[in-house]
Amino acid sequence: MINLKRWRFQFIQFFLGVIGILIIVKIYSYQTSPEAEAFRIGTEFAYTTLYPARGDIYDRNGNLLAGNITVYEVGVDLNIVRDNNNADAIALALSVNAGLDYADIYTKIIDSIKQTDPNIPLNYLVVADYIPADSVKKIRAYIKDLANKPGTPIESKLGGIGFKAHYQRFYPENSLASNVIGFVTLDNNGYFGVEQEYNNLLAGIPTNVLVPINPNRAEEIPQVEPGASLILTIDREIQSAMESILDKTLDDSGSDSGTIVVMDPRNGEILAMTSTPRMDLNDYMSFFDIIKDGTFFNRAISQAYEPGSVLKILTLATALDTGAVQTTTTFLDTGVIVVGGVPLTNWDQGAWGLQDMLGCTQHSLNVCFAWIATQIGTDNFYAYMKKFGLGHTTGIDMAGEATGRLKLPGDKDWYKVDLGINAFGQALSVTPIQMVMAASAIANNGRMVQPHILYATVENGTQQNKNYEVVGNPISPQTAQTLNELLAESLNTETSLAEVDGYRMAGKTGTASIPIFGGYDPSFTNASFIGWGPVDDPKFMVYIWLEKPKSSTWSSEVAAPVFKEVVEKLVVLMGIPPDQIRLQMTGQ
Amino acid sequence: MKTISRLFQTYIQAPWRTQLQWIGIFLTGLAILIIISAFYVNVTTRTALAGREIALAKDNILRMHHDISDLESTIASQGSTKNMQERAEILGFKPVGPEEFTFIYVPGYTQKTAFSLAPKAVRNAEPILLPEYTESLFDWFANRGQP
């Protein structure tokens, strides 16, 4: 009896032992099989692309100028589509809900299914990208409807379709400040303006990463930092007003193009900058229709031209600073002066008689200014022009700045007569932004500030404000103050169309001949105006350039009224009281 | 040797007592193993759940970033200069000219300050999380020893 029991126990022990060993062996074989390894890799990590957000761009008051919206990449798992035989349903759903081409999508899916190996676990095909969120919402609702509908054959369902969200650049203001901002293409690269200049800072670079699926490794899920956001010095309201004024001016004057720049001369902050043409940044493909035939994206920084008499303020600044003339110095204008063997005449071919420096400036006498240049001397004149930054980029933080051209003694194409011609702004070329930077020295007590568009960067939760830079002191504070007064007096007494009631401004007109092959265009001019104010405490500097105006060729008639209109807007938008009230307030 | 012979003798005389002892020892070991395994499974499960929650939270953060961007863009679009001007015109407003302004002196009033989207960057800033929330027990002991 005892032996029988022992035998039974021993048998059961042996049997269970064998079963246990077999289970352990099987578990081990499962764990070490190639399928288990593939499964492990598939469940441990997923290969994916992370699309970080491109940094936002704001104006100086926090209004969004460039942001991001969510769009979707639509893809299909070809294995599922093959098994479900629903390529037709997917193509139809995308066609109806997202406006995509049915035949395109259907062919793409079918061709890809034929070309792929069904044994590969994942065959993913991107069928469409940059699909708006609204369309994806419709497709998802459609999928849900089908799922809830009993009896729907699997061929009609949208099994295997997938959506991956990512960002696309969006410009809520459309064309506002488009010359300044630039645009971003689908490859997330910035072109022109701030988008190009700060592309590396703004761009969150799409990154291919292995994302751990194992929840125990959740901490290892990679996070891609978004790009830095930028706050610009631009004021949206001022920018909008300047664009409206420019558009109206072009209509009224029949000018080919126009440019307006508004800068704070105290620190170089660009408050507004616009030129024509502008484009809707959300429709960047229109670039090739709008910006063509050598047109510049932003004339204010990229197109150099002969500015004409606005440059006389630099000539006079040089003369006063070197002591070549005083404001009381007189010049007898006989209507012609010979410089380098070439006779130079006034804009009206007339002789204006005895004039002091105020008279020369008021009447914009070329002969007088050519004489002033000869008094300054060649070396001094060009040394000062270089100190004012002519012939060099200003270094403004926008892509595509041009240098302009300042011929210098010793250059093959420089002649002695150029000294006289350059003195009244011909035979050299500058960009509007170069003129604004140079003139900032006059408005700002001799300190020339670098124009800039970036106010601050916001990165990793902190804001870094940009400090302004004084890039030179080409003239003394005394010279700047003297010239300021002279230009204010000149504007008040001569250029009446630029005057603004209650506000004392300084400024200068410029009517320039346009060089053509073999000489100058007899029919058209470039009309420019530079001005700033209030004279005793300048808060803005305005540069206006109208290309080939038709209503009048004279700046005093076509550009000066624009300056008045601009200032009338600026004093309201910037809250600048009339001089009398402002001085009373300062006294209090 | 004496002990072994005594055990052997005992086994011969009452084998069930020794077997019970072995079974008891085995079951005790098994119980301990089960308890340890249960703890292990419990901790692993909670870790996995926490990991899953972290992954979901990160997904939610990403989704919220997308939502925030979309909402910001929508708001900016609706409040764009063009839209605001149109709305103002519909409501009967018109642009004001400099001659229509009345300036009054308000003691103590300062003009609006520069826009700030985030706090300014400060060098050598204090960490936001205190060490108590990040240091290990060993770190805490080690730090206590320092002056």
Image (cartoon, helix red, strand yellow):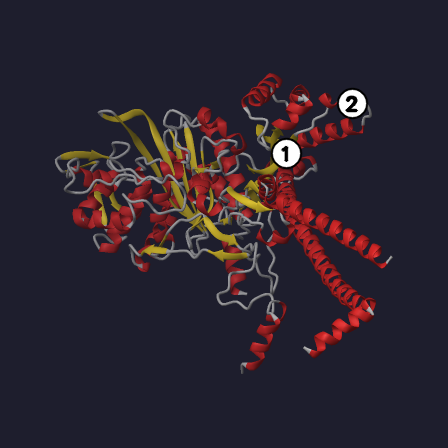
Same chain for the residues under marks 2 and 1 in the image: yes
Quarter of the image for residue A475 reads bottom left
- State the image coordinates of residue A75 (x, y, percent, origin top left): 60, 30
Q: Amino acid at mark 2?
A: Thr
Which residue is at the front of the view, A349 or A179?
A179
Q: Nearer the viewer, residue A482 or A425?
A: A425
**The residue under label 1 is which amino acid type?**
Phe
Q: Is residue A200 left or right of residue A8?
A: left
- Callout 2: helix, strand or loop? loop
Looking at the rendered structure, the secondary structure element under dot 1 is strand
Location of mark 2 (residue): A152
* Placement of B30 over or under A554, stated as above or below: below
Q: Would you say residue A415 is visible in this rendering?
A: yes
User: Which chain hosts label 1?
Assistant: A
The quarter of the image holding the N terminus of chain B is: bottom right
Could you say which is closer to the camera, residue B77 or residue A568? B77
The image position of residue A279, as x and y in percent, is: 49, 31
Q: Quadrant of the C terminus of chain B?
A: bottom right
- Looking at the image, residue A474 lies above or below residue B129: above
Whether residue A363 is visible, yes or no, is no
Between circles 2 and 1, the one closer to the viewer is 2
Residue ID for mark 1: A163
Task: Determine the residue positioned at 41% across, 27% down.
Answer: A256
Q: Is residue A6 left or right of residue A562?
A: right
- Left or right placement of residue B77 versus residue A57 in this view: right
Mark closest to the chain's N terminus, 2 or 1: 2
Q: x%, y% of residue A301?
A: 38, 40
The chain ID associated with circle 2 is: A
Q: Is residue A548 above or below residue A263?
A: above
